[in-house]
Amino acid sequence: MASAKKNPRPLPRITGLETEYGCMVASAAAGAVARVRDWVFDHNRFGLIDRHDRDWDEPPGNGGFLFNGGRVYLDMGHFEYCTPECASVTDVLRYDRAGDRLLLAAVKDLGLAESVHFFRNNIDHRSGATFGCHENFSLLRRAPLTEANVLSLLAFLTLRVLFTGSGRVGSARPTANSTEPAVEFQVSQRADYIENDFYEWVQHNRAIINTRDEPLADRNKYRRLHLIHGDTHVLPSALFLKIGATRLVLDLMEADSLPQLHLADAVGTLRSLSHQPAPPWTVRLGSGEMADPVEVLSRFRQRAQQLFSGRDAETDAVLDLWLKVERGLASDLSSLVGLVDWVTKQHLLEAFRQSEKLEWDDPWLEAQDLEYHHIDPERSLGLALANLEGPWAVGWDDAETLVRGPRQTRANRRSELMRKLAEGGHDYKIDWDQVESAAGETVLMPDPLGA
């Protein structure tokens, strides 16, 4: 590992989220998800619908790009919202919240508010299906992806479940052929569905780190780290910490300054931590020693503190929240109510369970679990307990995030080009890194940081 010097300047990094929303639809509102999608693009309301095949499973009309630089489409029946490319953690939160606001506006305008409900969650309790919240981070192609660094990154991405899990009642395991004991409540919604530490494809063999090399940018300069193992967040503070801490760890990797450690079994560790929603936790490192995962995570935070504290206000806010959550995990989970989703949900459901004298397998608790994730702030049980006293309290009434892309990235340029296309009435082909018009103009945008 190269010796690291304190770096006062933030490293440029693009981040984006892909959120697959859960949806509950009354029988009288069949086809509602497609109707909501069509409402978004009706008369170019919030974007331009695709007029060309994007892939073998994305025909024309399945989705399109938004004027905020993001994208909406249907993925195996789910409404999926992709944020635009964001250069800051705060912008990720602002544009992530825009997806909720878009859906709320659609169901209300379509008169579906009483029969169609969208949720920021990752499981269907009834069918056992899962759907994801994918994270995307740009990486410099020259980043030192040594085996030691990649295994250290894998360890962080596994152990961060202690502050990134959204919690769930029950589990996808045991299955009919499993000897694993039943779980009443667990830390993560996605952990039971992760099968590998590394894998190229994302369906049916889900991994902690997706290894497909698809930068959607200049291949000579950038990689894209694509993560599918994380939960969708309700609490803004939890999303702020997940994105912020992960960006800092990637900064450490690009500086070749990651703690040199790895886990004996990342996938097994992810599941075992998820199945134990109370300390003390222990994990086995690759060295064979047992360790406290909170202390292991602290090594990453301390290294980031040494190198990056004081470089900008957002970095310091992430480090401060990370330390607060670390202390809460180590000594007082109750201090994390309103900050960490799984702790908040467990607190809420335990109080409800005791007041109603319910067992954990009561369907009423599954219903309350789902209601925690409702996108409507008037109904969401999670948002009712959210701690909004921090820089993560953004995006609630931010009209710009529905119509304009982040100014620091190419998303803003894409937005401007799309508006010209809408005004001119020309045919077009839009992708993340280029915009083509039937008039013969092609604008290439290989650098995601190109404003």
Image (spheres, rainbow, N blue to C red):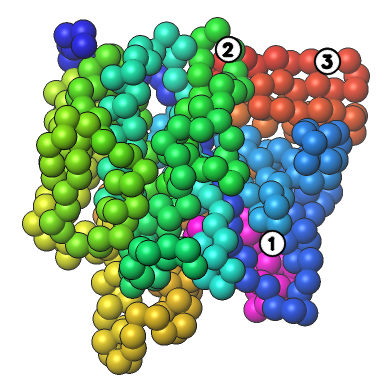
Observer-nearest of 115 and 263: 263
Element type where label 2 sits in the image:
loop
Q: Residue furthest left?
A: 331
The numbered mark, 1 or 3, whose residue comes first in the sequence reads 1
Instruction: State whether residue 425 appears in this view.
Output: yes
Amino acid found under the numbered disc labelled 2: Arg
**Badge 1 is on which residue?**
106
Q: Residue at position x 41%, y 36% from top?
A: 197
Q: Position of residue 269 (x, y in %)?
A: 29, 46
Relative horizontal placement of residue 184, taking residue 92 as reference (left or right): left
Look at discs 3 and 2 and give the one toward the viewer.
Answer: 2
Image vertical order of residue 58 relative to residue 349, above or below: above
Dot 3 corresponds to which residue? 441
Work out whether mark 3 precedes mark 2 in sequence or the reverse, and give the earlier one: 2
Q: Nearer the viewer, mark 1 or mark 2?
A: 2
Q: Which residue is mark 2?
A: 219
Write the start and end of the magenta stretch as one range. Answer: 101-122
Dot 2 surroundings within 10 Å: few (below 14), some, or many (20 or more)? some
How many numbered discs, if any? 3
Task: Look at label 1 and name its amino acid.
Answer: Ala
Q: Residue 376 at x, y = what percent?
A: 52, 67
Q: Position of residue 183 (x, y in %)?
A: 34, 69
Residue at 47%, 52% in the rendered image: 193
What whole-number distance in Å separates the C-alpha atoms at marks 3 and 2?
A: 23 Å
Placement of the C terminus among the 4 image quadrants:
top right
- Quarter of the image for residue 47 reads top right
Q: CA distance from mark 1 to mark 2?
A: 37 Å
Q: Which is nearer the eye, 298 or 35?
A: 298
Point out the image quarter for the N terminus.
top left
Q: Amino acid at mark 3?
A: Glu
* Contact between labelled residues 2 and 3, with CB atoms less than 8 Å apart: no
